[in-house]
Amino acid sequence: MLVSNLPVIRYNLLDNYRGLAVILMVIFHLCWNLKDFGFVHFDAYSDFWVNFRALIVFMFASAVGWSSYLAVLNHQPIARFLKNQCKVAFAASLITVATYLALPDQWVFFGILHFIFLAGFIVRPLSAHPCTSCLLGLSLIATSFLFNISSISTHKWFIQAFSVPSTTLDFVNPILWLGVVLIGPIFGYMNLHKMHIPQSQLTKLFSFLGKHALLAYLSHQLILYPLVMAAYFIVN
């Protein structure tokens, strides 16, 4: 049987979980766009906005580990896994090239998609051992806090190692968030994906966005930014 003909098993709660992360991401970037054009004013580095971003990254990162566990549980062919990884790699490359051409001083060299691509390979063999994976994940998170391995310090390492820009539009601390990815399989082991959620138009929207999270990530700013820019020129 061809890999493409194998059924793709979907889990409504996981799709809704990922879809909610997409919605929060859209809200986050919309607020930033409104701030950039002067419609609103806030401290982007206040605890609220830092924690808001952390929540979004946590949801995406944990969903990577969670879905990896389910893929292994359902004996997902390695060819399908590699196909999905290629999609993520292509999307990450688009982000890198686009930001390099548009903003060469702030281009994205290790954003969320680059991180998800790398983390996907790391969590895959550990997904069959969710308890071990969870312990490793907690260890990485603890190490990150105990030794103060922050986004700033890891970014500095990237700067020294690869001569990347000192500022970037998106950067993910690989140590901390890899820990979250490795915790993800325990969600599947606990059968959280089997929890029933009531069907409504809202959950259908979340589920749709969760199924197409990669496309939503790539396209949402292409829609939001021009809309906010148009509003700015209309108002002014």
Image (tube, helix red, strand yellow):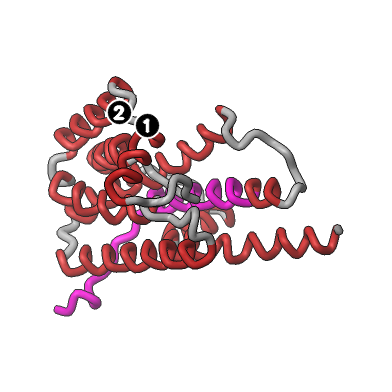
Query: Which of these two is toward me, 72 or 135?
Result: 135
Within 10 Å of the Cα at label 1, are there few (<14), some (14-19), or many (20+) other Cα atoms? Answer: some
Coordinates of residue 127 in the picture (x, y in percent): 18, 46
On residue 144, the disc is: 2
Query: Which of these two is toward me, 33 or 70?
Result: 33
Q: Quadrant of the N terminus?
A: bottom left
User: Bounds of the magenta span?
Assistant: 1-30
Q: Is residue 15 magenta?
A: yes
Residue at (38, 55) in percent of width and height:
109
Can the viewer see residue 148 in this picture? yes
Within 10 Å of the Cα at label 2, are there few (<14), some (14-19), or many (20+) other Cα atoms? Answer: some
Residue that carries the numbered disc 1 in the rendered image? 150
How far is the residue under mark 1 from the one under mark 2? 7 Å
Point out the residue furthest to the top here.
146
Q: Secondary structure at mark 2?
A: helix
Q: Secondary structure at mark 1?
A: loop
Whether label 1 touches label 2, CB < 8 Å: yes
Q: Is residue 218 magenta?
A: no
Query: Which of these two is toward me, 221 or 190?
Result: 221
Vertical arrangement, residue 178 with respect to residue 221, above or below: above
Q: Quadrant of the C terminus?
A: bottom right
Label 1 is placed on what type of residue? Ser
Residue 230: name its quadrant: bottom right
Vertical arrangement, residue 50 with respect to residue 159, above or below: above
Name the magenta segment's main secondary structure.
helix
Give the mark nearest the N terminus, 1 or 2: 2
Residue at (22, 63) in percent of width and height:
81
Residue at (40, 39) in percent of width and height:
58
Label 2 is placed on what type of residue? Ser
Counting every numbered tag in the picture gives 2
